[in-house]
Amino acid sequence: MKILIAIVAYNEEKNIAETVKDLQQHNFGYDIVLIDNGSSDRTAEIAKKMEIPVVAHCINTGSSAGTLKSYFLYAYKHDYDIVCQFDGDGQHVASELPKIIKPILDNKADYVIGSRFITRDGFQSSALRRLGISMFSWLDSMIVGYRITDITSGFRAYNRKVFAYFAKDYRHEVYDTSQLLLLSHFAGARIVEVPVVMQERKHGVSEYDWYNAVTFPIKGLITIMGVLLQIRKTRRFKHGLED
């Protein structure tokens, strides 16, 4: 299997070198690319000096969800079999990568979410954010019919069936992880969660500020309703989309 690790980052010059080193030290045969979400600091420059390919957005998309289509298309165009998202803020741990890749290698899943909340080890995020995560995890679980505990987790892996669908057949933006999960589910993806350990960022601040805390529930509900309205038009993987 040809595996790509896509680091997503926005203004992470204080974290990116350590993130790359962690991935390089635990590399079991994967390639790495940085998706720079319009950084105004030296994030991309540092990655290039460490010989990491960079795909740079000219503007910030507003959240890491805006990087999805970029690394899906990159993985599709470069003939990868699996792509994993890995956040550039230092919260994800490279030694945990085999946990989210194994279900795909074993052909037990098409889409894997690394959850902080199954075993509750490691960094658990703030109380306010956990409340929002719990609410939308419950709502999405009710819709798909199986339990999701960490809907906003950025530590995820996808097989080619999933990322090819979004790279060439779904011609719209993906605004959040609920939308991604529901679209994948209705298209026929086998989605599973696995327990992972994350750590708190050492430098900088999250893009999830007070404004996002206020607007997140509103935007989340709108995207969920949008997906539900598209169910009948959602193409399924069996219709020639395995690629």
Image (tube, rainbow, N blue to C red):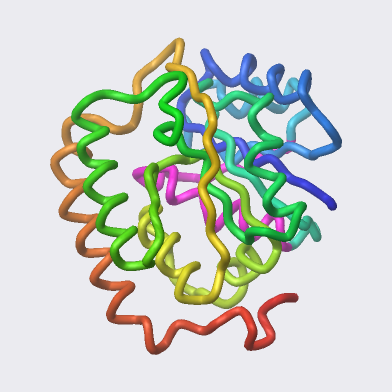
Q: Answer above or below: position of 67 versus 223.
A: above
Above-or-below relation of 201 to 116: above
Residue 180 appears in which quarter of the rendering?
A: bottom left
- Horizontal side, residue 70 vs residue 94: left or right: left
- Left or right of 8 in this view: 2: right
Of the 4 image quadrants, the one containing the C terminus is: bottom right
x, y percent for residue 160: 70, 63
Residue 49 spot, x, y in % from top left: 74, 21
Is 185 one of the magenta-colored residues?
Answer: no
Q: Is residue 220 above or below residue 33?
A: below
Residue 181 at x, y = what percent?
A: 44, 60
Q: Magenta residues, as a range?
A: 53-76
Q: In percent of the image, x 61 and y 48: which residue is there?
A: 157
Residue 98 picture location, percent across and down: 71, 36
Is 109 left, or right, of 224 in this rendering? Answer: right
The residue sitting at 68% across, 24% down in the picture is 95
Q: How many marks?
A: 0
Looking at this view, is 124 or 213 the one in front? 124
Based on the picture, tell me whether residue 70 belongs to the magenta stretch.
yes
51 or 146, nearer to the observer? 146
- Residue name at image x 52 percent, y 53 percent: 68
Q: Residue at x 47, y 38 (%)?
A: 115
